[in-house]
Image (spheres, rainbow, N blue to C red):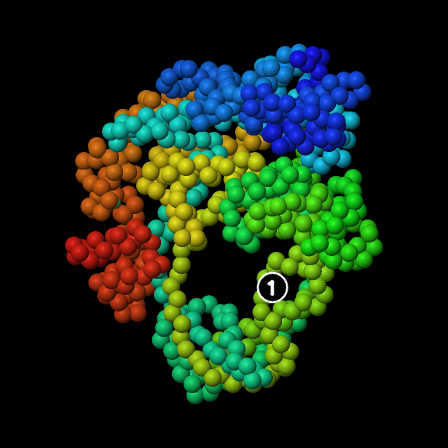
């Protein structure tokens, strides 16, 4: 067997293979140990072995039952989790290859997770004294070779930050989840395993906040004038820009005037030439946004597809926050390579002509300490699935566009006055395409050539005038993307973990897809409210953000992991002790939010504990809202009964409002 070899640890089999071939070309031999492949080659009389992990081989665990619990250790994941039993073979492989090695190189993905994966393998099976880190942002041969020539010592700050994240997530997760499961299982009389967490719970809270607003929405009528007029033989409908009317009669009076004198006057014409800068290079979040907008795929899905493209060495590392391409990047070489792909040949040639071969990206402001923005490596893709192909196309085009020149558009805005009402007509046409040639995925608005014929003071003929009734609408439902953006905006989670945490909320059945958005289950709503009552700090983003800041400081070597973990333990201990003291109260509290065995006085609509005079906390709120909005309908001739019927039948009405309206109709409860 091998002896005195150097072991190179890769994060996944595909990456291991790429690394081996990049370093040794065809002089590499592939072996298998318990079915797992590894690669061996000799370079300058030294034997090298490249072996794959399969993500994390270790996880935190405890054998202590109950809560709070503060003792834990790293254990093999395959022992802890039955679904991870395939990892045993990878573990055996590492154990086997670490034994007689003289040195270890951690060549896992260059981020805190990759640093932790390699560190734990070397710490458990090898020797940290002879360990090195290989840093690269893409799996192209040239980058792997140059990373191999510039090995550094282990990146201790990143390892410490990574270990800290795992410990904090574990401590919060296990203690909150056990407390929550205990209380809810007791209250509903059967065993239920629930989860809560440092990042997951504030995110669930945000989703439930919006969903509750929607469920409590009472539509109120608003009236808009709608006119059709003729310009240069074409019928156009301008957009009303004033405040909508709450009083229909007032608007009706104006419409009568329009009928007698059906003319509009051009009040002003505003023509602007606008410059649209080229887009910034992609970071993960921007890529997820565009993938959602253009391909309708979830952030978790687009991340997975991008990771596949990275493992095929087609793009650089996608888990990055950076919107910058570094000066050191050889864009000319990438362009040359991309021009070999028939689909992009013409575009690349145009870009080279346009830029005269000087490639200056329009870098954004966001940065990442480990990686540049996402770029195509230029390697020609083979046999991509349709969705991989589409995402790859967006990445290539975005990369090309960022080097191009600004686009110029002509924005024509015509303001029209009709008996004191203001309307606007708009046309946007492109004068200079610039970067839009490369990245055409933008919606500018309609082009209406007739508008160029309009002059100030012109009289236009109105052919139709009517009243449009619209109802006030609730906020749009959350989506996976809007939650991801929210997490980013409040600074919780990391670009690699956010999409996955949202998926956890679905797996726990707290959230589910409904139509084009997300809705919450009774359980999700109950868990959120219970957490808000029992551990307001965990729902609040402030605490989570504070610990995210700490982890940044660890990464910069300015604070120690032990200090941060100790602070978290003290905080968790205090919280859990409080809950244990008030367990009975917590169980009773839960009955407010979900139907349980201990409900004494159930809400006639949903079975939750009654809080107000008639209903539970949610339906009581709905009743208050219904009463508050009645005046808006009363003033336009609806009596209480008619109002309830109308509200019940409107599609846009919130769920809890509908349920209360229906109940009131059936049971004849009066408005007071
Ligand atoms: Zn209720």
Q: Find residue 487 and report its horizontal and vertical position in percent.
A: 52, 41
Q: Is residue 477 left or right of residue 142?
A: left
- Mark 1: few, some, or many residues within 10 Å (few <14, many ≥20)? few
Q: Position of residue 665 (x, y in %)?
A: 20, 58
Q: Is residue 181 above or below residue 309?
A: above
Asked if the residue at label 1 sits under 8 Å from ligand 1, the reply is no
Which picture quadrant has residue 53?
A: top right
Q: Disc 1 marks which residue?
A: 444
Assign the N terminus to one quadrant of the image. Answer: top right
Count of marks, rendered view? 1
Q: Nearer the viewer, residue 67 or 240?
A: 67
**View quadrant of ligand 1:** top left
Which residue is more in the foreground, 301 or 289? 301
Residue furthest bottom as drawn: 260
Q: Which of the 4 image quarters holds residue 115?
A: top right
Q: Quadrant of residue 367?
A: top right
Quarter containing the C terminus: bottom left
The answer to which of 361 and 45 lies nearer the viewer is 45
Q: Which residue appears farthest toward the left when viewing the image?
A: 667
Residue 180 sits above or below residue 330 on the image:
above
Task: List x then y, in percent, for residue 146.
Answer: 77, 31
Q: SS class of the residue under badge 1?
A: loop
Please give the name of the residue rendered at 55% of the width and 72% of the height, measured from the top-left corner: 424
């Amino acid at each position: 067997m091998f002896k005195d070899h150097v072991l190179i640890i890769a994060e996944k089999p595909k990456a291991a293979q790429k690394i081996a071939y990049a370093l040794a070309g065809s002089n590499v031999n592939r072996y298998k140990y318990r079915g797992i492949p590894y690669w061996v080659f000799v370079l300058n009389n030294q034997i090298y072995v490249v072996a794959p992990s399969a993500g994390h081989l270790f996880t935190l665990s405890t054998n202590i039952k109950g809560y709070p619990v503060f003792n834990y250790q790293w254990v093999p994941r395959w022992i802890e989790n039955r679904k991870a039993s395939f990892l045993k073979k990878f573990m055996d492989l590492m154990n086997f290859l670490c034994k007689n090695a003289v040195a270890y190189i951690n060549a896992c993905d260059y981020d805190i997770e990759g640093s932790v994966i390699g560190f734990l393998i070397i710490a458990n099976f090898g020797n940290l004294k002879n360990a090195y880190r290989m840093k690269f942002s893409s799996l192209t041969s040239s980058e792997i070779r140059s990373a191999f020539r510039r090995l550094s010592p282990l990146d201790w700050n990143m390892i410490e930050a990574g270990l800290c994240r795992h410990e904090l997530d574990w401590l919060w997760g296990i203690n909150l989840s056990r407390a929550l499961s205990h209380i809810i299982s007791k209250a509903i009389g059967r065993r239920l395993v629930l989860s809560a967490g440092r990042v997951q719970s504030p995110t669930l809270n945000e989703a439930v906040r919006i969903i509750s607003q929607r469920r409590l929405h009472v539509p109120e009528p608003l009236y808009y004038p709608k006119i059709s007029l003729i310009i240069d033989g074409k019928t156009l409908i301008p957009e009303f820009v004033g405040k909508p009317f709450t009083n229909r009669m007032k608007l009706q009076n104006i419409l009568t005037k329009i009928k007698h004198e059906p003319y509009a006057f051009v009040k002003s014409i505003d023509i602007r030439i606008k410059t649209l800068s080229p887009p910034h290079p992609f970071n993960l979040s921007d890529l997820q946004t565009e993938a959602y907008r253009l391909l309708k795929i979830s952030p978790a899905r687009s991340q997975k597809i991008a990771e596949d493209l990275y493992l095929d060495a087609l793009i650089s590392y996608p888990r990055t926050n950076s919107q910058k391409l570094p000066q050191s990047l050889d864009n000319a070489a990438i362009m040359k390579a991309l021009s070999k792909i028939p689909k992009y040949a013409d575009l690349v040639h145009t870009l080279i002509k346009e830029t005269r071969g000087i490639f200056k990206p329009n870098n954004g402001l966001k940065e990442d300490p480990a990686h540049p923005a996402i770029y195509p490596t230029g390697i020609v893709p083979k046999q991509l699935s349709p969705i991989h192909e589409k995402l790859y196309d967006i990445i290539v085009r975005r990369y090309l566009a960022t080097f191009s020149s600004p686009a110029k558009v002509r924005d024509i805005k015509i303001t029209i006055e009709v008996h004191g009402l203001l309307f606007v007509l708009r046309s946007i046409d492109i004068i200079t395409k610039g970067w839009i040639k490369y990245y055409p995925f933008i919606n500018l608005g309609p082009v209406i050539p007739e508008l160029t014929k309009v002059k100030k003071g012109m009289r236009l003929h109105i052919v139709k005038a009517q009243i449009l009734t619209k109802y006030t609408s609730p906020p749009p439902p959350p989506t996976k993307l809007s939650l991801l953006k929210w997490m980013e905006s409040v600074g919780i989670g990391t670009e690699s973990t956010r999409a996955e945490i949202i998926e956890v909320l679905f797996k726990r059945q707290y959230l589910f897809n409904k139509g084009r958005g997300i809705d919450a289950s009774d359980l999700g709503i109950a868990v959120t409210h219970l957490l808000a009552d029992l551990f307001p700090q965990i729902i609040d983003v402030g605490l989570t953000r504070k610990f995210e800041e700490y982890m940044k400081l660890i990464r910069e070597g300015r604070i120690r992991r032990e200090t941060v973990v100790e602070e978290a333990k003290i905080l968790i201990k205090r919280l859990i002790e409080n809950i244990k003291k008030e367990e009975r109260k917590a169980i009773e509290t839960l009955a407010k939010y979900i139907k349980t065995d201990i409900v004494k006085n159930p809400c006639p609509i949903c079975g939750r504990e009654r809080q107000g005079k008639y209903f539970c906390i949610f339906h009581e709120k709905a009743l208050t809202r219904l009463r508050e909005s009645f005046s808006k309908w009363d003033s336009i001739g609806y009596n209480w009964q008619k109002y309830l019927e109308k509200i019940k039948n409107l599609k846009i009405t919130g769920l809890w409002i509908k349920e209360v309206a229906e109940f009131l109709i059936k049971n004849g409860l009066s408005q007071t």
